[in-house]
Amino acid sequence: MNITRENIDSVNAVVKVLIEKTDYEKTVEETLKEYRQKSSIPGFRPGKAPIGLIKKRFGTSVMVEEINKMLSQNLTRYLVDEKLRILGEPLSSTEQQKPIDWDNDENFEFAFDVALAPEIEVPLDEKDKLDYFTIKVADDMIDQQIEMIQSQMGQNVDSEAVKEKDLSRGDFVELDAEGNEKEEGVRAEGVLLSVDLIKDEEIKKQFLGKQKGEVLVFDPVKAYQDRHEVGHLLKISHEEADELNSEFKFTITEILEFKKAELNEELYKKIYGEDTEVKTEEDLKKKLKEEIALSLLQSSDRKFATDVRDTLVEKIKPELPEAFLKRWLIESNRDVTEEQIDKDFDGFLKDLRWQLIKDVIIKDNELKVEEEEALGFAKQLAHAQYSQYGIYNAPEDQLESFAKMILEKPEEKERLYNKLLEDKVIDVVKEKITLQEKEVTREEFEEMAK
């Protein structure tokens, strides 16, 4: 067997694999003998058919299978041994692959188009300048955060009379045309209504000012103008709700008013733990300002990372075998149309160029992600997720358990490691170039992000 490579240019090559009869003949003969032993051919005892007949019937298919196996194994080994950094996968050469006659040829030459990753350098020094935008923490951001915390930590309390934003719990009883309770009518106990969700204004007004024990009479379908929702309220089927055409008596048994959490030490301990240094509203605002600033830094970092990518891709612009790559995408994604590939191709090239640049920075700076780093980052993600549900002080063992669960999922683990590695790449760039820090308002930042 003979393998040769012809470099067409710096990023395109043709690899030719010559497989001669002596390379496959012995293995094919052995395989055919095994076929003979296992074959059952009419007119011959099992395993006794003439070898010539076996060759005639199975020879070509066995040879093709063996040659394809040898071709795949040896081409892969060649690419590894030669340390060729290729893009995509080798494709049968459109120009240099000769026709193959499996029935008559004894020696077979295969030609593959191969895309080579370009050799690039990523020079970074203090002469390179890039803006880094930090977002000013405005008072309204702190006020909004306080409002959110008070809402998340708030609770429903008993109220004497119904107000528009209150919840009203009560019992429904269906009435007949004369206003009497139907013996076999619909009944639902302990139904909780949100008064402000009632769509009919007249019925909504009936609720306002009512107290426990008082009774209202109204048509729930008219009140909510949604039979599906009424079906859930009354705990009846969709079919029953579709036929419903009655007024109901609603007896109020409980009135609940939502009270936001008060700003006091008890609330601060719930958020930050028993040993918190936050004692006053002023302390809370100071703490929230630090947290918001840290959170906004993530937005600043994301924009900076995007700016780094765009700047380095444009500055270095690694040469790519674009014709090959488009062909490879088309051939390896049969379920995607050529029009879709054309539409996304520029974005694909940009992502690939950025990946090549990152690979150089990672190699030059010997960057890697340790397991402890990954676990720490996963715990941060877990903490952020708990916080979304108002759990600001989740136990450490609970965070670690959640983090390990994240890392047990291969796709999540890969995504997390790639994120951390890219962060390290951006940190390297940040250290080596000159940052021009600029403070902007949130509105200015959002406008730039567009």
Image: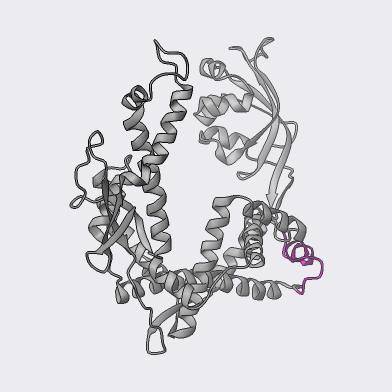
Residue 56 makes an appearance in the image: yes
At which x and y percent is residue 47?
A: 47, 20
At which x and y percent is residue 195?
A: 60, 39
The stretch in magenta equals: 261-277
Q: Where, by quadrant of the figure, is residue 273 drawn?
A: bottom right
Q: Is residue 135 above or below residue 213?
A: below
Locate the C terminus by quadrant: bottom left
At which x and y percent is residue 48?
A: 44, 18
Q: Residue furthest toward the right?
A: 274
At 34% from the left and 73% from the top, the residue drawn is 119
At which x and y percent is residue 58?
A: 35, 27
At 58% from the left and 56% from the top, the residue drawn is 413
Q: Where, by quadrant of the figure, is residue 162 drawn?
A: top right
Q: Using residue 125 as the reference point, say whether residue 365 is left or right of it.
A: right
Relative depth, front residue between 324 and 381 = 324
Relative depth, front residue between 202 and 321 = 321
Is residue 349 located in the magenta-colored stretch of the structure? Answer: no
Q: Is residue 220 above or below residue 83?
A: above
